[in-house]
Amino acid sequence: MATPNRFIFTLCAVSAISSGCASSGGDGAPATVASTTSSSSSGVTTLRTYKETTLANGLKVLFLPDSTLPALSMGLLVKSGSSSDPAGRSGLSSLVADLLDQGTKRRNANQIAEDLGRMGASFGASVDYDYSYLSLSGLSVSAPALLSNFAEIATGPSFPDAEISRIRKQTLASIERGLDNPRNVAELGTLTAVFGQHPYGQSVSGSMKTVAALSKKDVIQHYLRFYRPNNSILVVVGKFDSEFEKKVETTFGSWAKRDVPAQNLATPKMSEGLRIRVVEKAGLTQAQIRFASVGIKRQDDDFLALRVANTILGGAFASRLNDKIRKELGLTYSISSNFDSRMERGPFVISTFTKIESIDSVVSETLKLYKVFVEKGVTSDELNRARGYLKGIFPQAIETSDKLGFNLVLLRLYGIPDRYLTHYLRELDDLSVSDINSAIRRHMKPENLAIVVHAPKEAADKLKAMSPQFEVVPVNSLQ
Amino acid sequence: MENTKKKKVAVRFFARVLQAIVASLILSPLAVAVEPAKPEPAKPEPTKVASSKPDSTLGVRFAVEKEVLPNGLTVLYHVDRSVPLVSYHTWFKVGSKDEKTGLTGIAHLFEHMMFKGSKRYSGDQFDLILQSNGATNNAFTTQDYTGYHINAPSSKLELLIDIESDRMATLKIDKAALDSERNVVKEEKRFRVDDNPMGLLWQGIYATSFSRHPYKNPVIGTMEDLSNVTPEIAQAFHKSFYSPSNAVIVVAGDFELAEAQRLIKKYYAGIPRQEVKRPTLPEEPEQGSPRSTFIRRDLKSWTFAVNYKAPAAGTDESFALDLLSAIMGRGPSSRLYKRIVYKDQFATSASAGNNTMQDAGLFQIFVTMKPSATASEAQQQFLAAQRAIYGEMWRPRNIAVTEAELERARNQMIMSQVDSLKTLHGKAEALAMNEILFGDYKRVFTDIDRYLKVTPGQILKAAQKYLVPERSNLVVVRPKGA
């Protein structure tokens, strides 16, 4: 559990609480944004060289050579994630991703694990609302084998019955176990509180009911529909030569293209008023608390202005929320805010926790602070400090070729030009206090919030007076 | 997906939030320690390690300059000008094992106080100034050491040196700040331990496995002991352990060596050396019989760990056990995964790790069980999983591992090391840890060779010596009732 917390994509994807991941999550490019290397005095950054090509079958391929370490990694982003799961079939994208390395036409699950293990390589597959991402990393001495393994897993899974049934049971167990983790429960409770029946309201892993119903037919159909070269981006990072690049192109060049159905994701709507949902569980000593609403799309013009605003509110350690609730009042170990900007309007969430005796103080202090923040806006001092911070961490964010590669892939997913990275410093300089404050007023609505509290029922009852929209649900209702 | 990444240190508590721990419950909690090294007699140091590669193409080498100031402060410099960043680490040889009775948790609470103001940078200026200069920072406390680190644009190096030297020399403990931070730490404890099954498990592991050595105490402390810390006690703690002679600084990144050395001297040379009053630690007696602890909470499913007392960091045997832990429980091609998760399907995860600390080690196996329909079925499943584990643990004591398994484990170790050295921060951390634990940062360069030298016979011997029932400690976090 070492590791610098702030810039780890994989962790950010799982966790919304971290201040460091503020505004990353699905939006990719941004939070953890950045590029590396030289920035001229004009505020324009030159990115490390990379090569981009599109194969005849429509697969976009990015090559980022880096021979500083004897390592090689490949990532494949499929531009479909859990929001493409059909109604009543949530968890399908995840199940498909989890099954990819559980058998191909040539090898079974154990053989694949064995072959990867022997090289010291590790395969990962993760799913977010907007995309699925497969990755394989290993030592560059094994480059040819890494490539053939990756291609076989990504393009030739066989979905054996036994593995489907095994992984499905495993997933069901994990969903149920997840209720033992208070933070996970608070996040599940927040999903539906904000998004209702919208696909963003479903858990990426699905529910016990939907996962239990997933069939082999669902899996195969989903795979054949979305796992197509013309719906994917491949990124290759590390120590390799041009010979290897050709090999990548040939290997993935034989993947068959097919039209992929367009996704018509509705725009999530914000519901009115202050709504309080208590997810009750006896015995907890601490309450997990979320204040959540519908945020913005990654493509929103206010994206960067809100990133600055969020840094000031609760996106960094020295921020209004942390200064007040943690440093001044000592009521929590962590409070942070985050815009998770996606293809459609993703969530904006303030996350914290406190001993059950202080639930009402934390809720009222946080609400008060958030209201003042929106009404009065930020000051020019705050803007300067936030700008200094964001500009300073910019190179860290893609210090390594792996980080740069992932950023480039996400930019392509969301249709954002590289200009976002190359002109990031300049754009930050160009933002004024009034730009920030009008973006805040456009998108932050303290009067329309879902407040989710995971705590023993009696402890949360004190909040009842705050809103007529008050409900208590048992923890098991979230499974 | 099984997370095959291992982390270096088992339990760390941070001044800031660290997500990793929390996200782990479902995915793979089982971050376990591994940071071996060896007990070679210290050789006179050439101050510079050339960046030449060793024979193997897998080897990792980078240039490091070591310097010890007259006040005892050790400084390591690694210049890498490829990115305009610098990673600045300040580690102290003090951890929870150095705490007095009645003051558990002080090392970590004190770490929080290091952010609350010193002479030139008072109050909350520390965070504000660093942040507005584009720096990120954090700190952590373990049983053996405490580390502070800042990553920043390289143009800010002098600021980092100024601000870090100020709090090393002139930290102020203010009563109100201490009271407030104590509450913050209590919230951290509820979050990481009291309401967190994995946190409870880890706490139970140390409490069960150690009977006398202070490794038995929770790093985060007890609520009572946290309440015992007064400003005077905290100030005395600073005087006892935050002497420059008890610290290692690592500067890694984009800077001019001579200039960095000049600045280090300018800011640190005047800090007087303090006498470090390290307590004599009670020796942990040989464990003669298996122990177990059951912790009951309102939970859906069982989680358990089997912990064998094993050798400390740096020993040859710890390298052998590191490799065996990978063979037993690292990733989906490992023995325990294949048996418990894949074949028997009792568990959502099964993994192993060799957790090496300065004075002792633990060879650990972690299993997260699937929830069961009834309490008695859960009990049966747990017993069956436990039998399967003990059966699997019989094998390495009696049958040597195969060359193929060993090769896989070695490759995994090399891969982890390569991964951990991808960033400046990772390099600085590896250097600091080796220098702190062994007084020899160069061990980071010899780890791979030492893994390559381990034979199946050595693994067999280490397993026979350490992985025996008499040295085992079972800790179970389970649902209430039945």
Image (cartoon, rainbow, N blue to C red):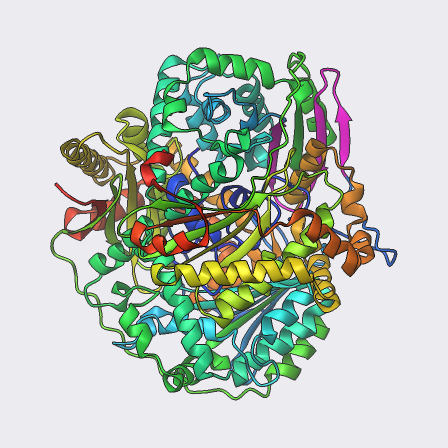
The C terminus of chain B - image quarter: top left
The image quarter containing residue B315 is bottom left
Residue A298 position, x and y percent, is 68, 39
Q: A39 or B373, which lies in front? A: B373
In magenta, the rendered stretch is A50-78
- Vertical side of B101 occupied by A465: above or below: above
Q: Is residue A59 within the magenta segment?
A: yes
- Depth order, front residue of B146/A29: A29
The residue that appears at 46% across and 10% down in the rendered structure is: A217
The residue at 67%/27% (across/down) is A233
Towards the viewer: B416 or B372: B372
In x, y percent, where is residue A96? Answer: 48, 22
Picture residue at 54% right of the left edge, 36% below the top: A138
Task: Left or right? Give the position of B49 relative to B338.
Answer: right
Q: Quadrant of residue B36?
A: bottom left
Q: Is residue B362 visible?
A: no
| Secondary structure mostly seen in the magenta stretch | strand
Residue A386 location, x and y as percent? 69, 61
